[in-house]
Image (cartoon, helix red, strand yellow):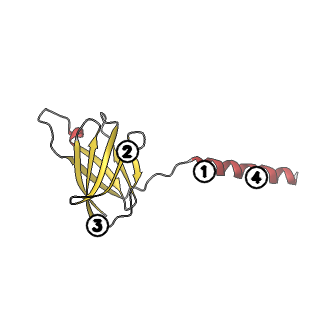
Amino acid sequence: MRNLVFFSLLLASLFTFCLKADESPKPVKTEKLILIEKEPERAPRTLGDLFVTCYYNNECLEVEFPADVNSMDITISDGAVTIWSGFVTADAPACDIPYLVGQYQITCTTDNGAVYQGILSL
């Protein structure tokens, strides 16, 4: 009986460990930034199309996608010099960035051509 209880506890702990190992880590949302569209079109648009929300910290970045956007090219720069660039999709909106400290310009270009910009304060 004692061996059966021990075996059951061991099996339960292995099952729990396997479930925890399958969970993918999500980035910590520490700062929130609203990226404003660089040159909005003159046609009437909804308020949601005029900005993109970005959550970030020193090591990762996550973007909330507008309804009509499937992917974005992201560039982090220091003036005219590109520090980092990457690509995110609506299915995987988070990405790792290099550890940065200071203020940097972030530019997100969507698959439909809209450009959103803001300043990251890291």
At label 2, the amino acid type is Val
Q: In this view, does 47 lie above or below 97?
A: above
Q: In which quarter of the image is the C terminus?
A: bottom left
> For the residue labelled by badge 2, is the local secondary structure a helix, a strand or a loop?
strand
Q: Position of residue 84 (x, y in %)?
A: 33, 56
Who's the residue at 27% across and 47% down the image? 108
Q: Which marked residue is nearer to the observer: mark 1 or mark 2?
A: 2
- Residue under label 1, please give it: 21
**Residue density around tag 2, few if under 14, some if 14–19, many if 20 or more, within 10 Å:** many
Q: Which of marks 1 and 4 is in front?
A: 1
Q: Do the residues labelled 1 and 4 touch (CB within 8 Å)?
A: no
**Label 4 or label 2, whichever comes before in sequence order:** 4
Judging by the rendered image, the residue that carries numbered circle 2 is 88
The residue lying at 20 percent from left, 48 percent from top is 36
N-term-proximal mark, 1 vs 2: 1
Please report whichever mark, 1 or 4, sits nearer to the chain's N-terminal start. Answer: 4
- Gap between marks 1 and 4 measured at Cα: 18 Å
Q: Are the residues tagged 1 and 3 within 8 Å (C-beta)?
A: no
N-terminal label among 1 and 3: 1
- Of tags 1 and 3, the one toward the viewer is 3
Q: Is mark 1 on a helix, strand or loop?
A: helix
Callout 4 amino acid: Leu
Q: Residues within 10 Å of mark 4 (few under 14, many from 20)?
A: few
Q: Name the residue under label 3.
A: 102
Return the residue at label 4. 9
The CA distance from mark 4 to mark 2 is 42 Å
Measure the C-alpha gap from mark 2 to mark 3.
Answer: 23 Å
Label pair 1/2, CB-CB below 8 angstroms: no
3D distance between C-alphas at marks 1 and 2: 24 Å
Q: Where is residue 12 in the image (x, y as percent from the top left)?
A: 72, 49
Which kind of residue does numbered mark 1 sit on?
Answer: Ala
